[in-house]
Image (cartoon, rainbow, N blue to C red):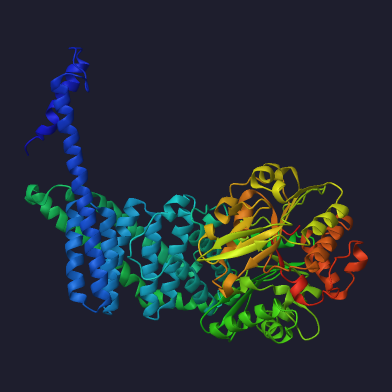
Amino acid sequence: MQPNLRYVNVVALTLLSLLGLGLTYPDNNQVSTNAKLKYDSGQKAQASSKNNSQLEIERLNEEAIKKSRQGQYTEAVQRLQKALAISREHGERSWEAVTLNNIGRIYQSQRKYPEALQSYQQAILINKELGDLVRLGKTYSNIGYLFDIQNKPGLAIFFYKHCLINREKARLNPSALSAPQPDAYSITVRQTYRILGERLLKQERVAEAQRTIDLLKVEELEEYLQNVPGNKRTTKGINIAVREKPIKQKLDKTLDNAVVLGKELTTLRKISPKERSLQQKQRIEQLVLTQQQLLDEFNEFIDSPLIKAQIDQISRTARRQNLDLDSLNELRDDLARLPQKSALLYPLILKDSLELVLVTPDSPPIHRSVAVKRENLHQTIVAFRQALINPSQNIKVPARQLYNWLIKPIEKDLKLSGTQTLIYAPDDRLRYIPLTALYDGKQWLVERFSVNHITSASLTNLNTPKQSTLRVLAAAFTKGNYQIKVGNRQVSFAGLPFATREVESLAAAVPETTKLLDDAFSPRVTVPQMDDYTIVHLATHAAFVVGKPEDSFILFGNGDRVNFRNIASWSLPNVDLVVLSACETGLGGKLGNGEEILGFGYQMQQTGARAAIASLWSVDDGGTQALMSAFYTTLSSKGLTKTAALRQAQISLITGNWKTINDHTPVTAVTNFSHPYYWAPFILIGNGL
């Protein structure tokens, strides 16, 4: 092979410099300059060639996907084979894996399942060799989906789990998760987690399902906010069941051996095909063949009667096993240490059912399935919300229906466990309605249970004690009018007429209260002093808007806004509670999947604050003042937890006892606040102590 003359001058000049002959590199003499220019030119040419090859591979993949969607599979495969050749010629290993995934997807569309599996597995080897956990996880999802559509749920679960395991490891480096990903995967990561949860519940593998559903919340936050970091809890991923372990061991051994071969193959492929010796060509053929033999052996293994029987046995024995014990025991311990008997409730909305998972400190996780179609559930949620925000409407019909779906199936379980507090991780559009306002035919749910919302058990410390002394920073937007662009429309936000009295009654309940009104209530003045207090109370508008985090915001008294993306920059490690008493959700009647509410709760956690209270709609009369006054009086005088104090305040509005709790009667024509419109919008998210 001829030496590369571009680098000869550079090497020679460097040696002369080391020998002390007065020449340096780089320097100002003409020879060095020419050498440097040639070197730089060579580097730029290589970079340009690499960029061009990447663009060509990307173009071919995009064209192939388009052809595939039009049913032109032959043309699609031709383009992908060309992309594969270019990626191998230029050493574009990551793009080689992407192309292999897309080849697999086309074979899958043609029901050529063995060929699809082979292509996905080759992509797995490359991603494993590169250490790319994100794409490795997504390729495992492709394999899981491939088995899923073949009605092989046991193997689908096994590979979906590997998506979750690798995804949660990658979450420790959150910037990797937010990097743009090419279109090379059958379903999204969020869909993978949701389907995995569904498949596990179908096999009554409830502990594993609970773990998956909890981590689904974390993945939803990642899709909404991006750069959501993992922690000790999330990185544990999900356990491999005992009967899955032989497959896991065989898979790991196969991949490890194949990756070793792959590294040698990569080195050989860096040599231009024209310059490869006969021996090198033969070695490449041998390595490719050996890799494929390893994968074929693994596929024969998982297709063997013995392994099929073991996989089938998992679902039959799941009810008698405590799978995923580490995560489950940690969660049970957290629940057991709470002052009130508590249970954790996860609803999961599926196309044709509502799945309920209940975790108590003393028993295996409980699963109840409710036959209701997603459309019917969503319609009832909308009807319930409309009745909630209109006190003249009869709310009890949708409230009773939702009770029958969400609580009645677990009613006996709650009674047996002695549950007093429901820790609630709502799913999808259930985030837009308060659980407290469900109706059992005799009373509201809040009259039986305290309710504490969380983003995810994996992200929430349920047992951090509250500060012993109450110190409140109370700020209010009381006058003026601001035109704010919300989405594609202008919305007018006026000062809250009762906010002044709300702040005054709060100050009467908690003597150590500092008040900031209107222009004094600006981000520049307010934010730096928040952490000097244990409670930050903001009587102002906040908008929960479907879309990006930047679309949702808190409005300050001087007209400035802080969007939900920027909230996380606040530093509030000493704050027990942040209260937003006049929030709006579903502006313009538009409901999404509630990720803006989930995102708000998480961003507040990121500040260091232990919990937040927000309202799901704005109560623009004395109801908010009455409830908040009762809440703070109860919190400061009775030594209750935040969750219990909120419940007592809500019950006081239902019964009318709020008048006896405080002396600050709202200046309003309304004196009956028993309708859920007045007391139900307020939800507590985070640590309820």
**Whether residue 522 can be seen here:** yes
| Foreground residue among 334 and 513 | 513
Residue at horizontal 52 percent and vertical 72 percent from the top: 197
Residue at horizontal 16 percent and vertical 23 percent from the top: 32
Position of 550 with respect to 345 (left or right) is left
Q: Give the quarter of the image for residue 100.
A: bottom left
Residue at horizontal 32 percent and vertical 52 percent from the top: 129
Q: Residue 466: x, y in percent?
A: 77, 51
Position of 617 with respect to 296 (left or right) is right
On the rendered image, what quadrant is the C terminus found in? bottom right
| Foreground residue among 673 and 559 | 559
Q: Residue 642: x, y in percent?
A: 78, 59
Residue at the front extreme of this rendering: 480
Q: Give the quarter of the image for residue 119.
A: bottom left
Q: Residue 412: x, y in percent?
A: 74, 81
| Foreground residue among 364 and 378 | 378
Up/down of 93 relative to 118, above or below: above
Up/down of 174 relative to 399, above or below: above
Q: Give the quarter of the image for residue 234.
A: bottom right
Callout count:
0
**Whether residue 325 can be seen here:** no
| Foreground residue among 522 and 217 | 522
Q: Residue 305: x, y in percent?
A: 37, 78
On the rendered image, what quadrant is the N terminus found in? top left
Residue at horizontal 26 percent and vertical 72 percent from the top: 66
Residue at the top extreme of this rendering: 21
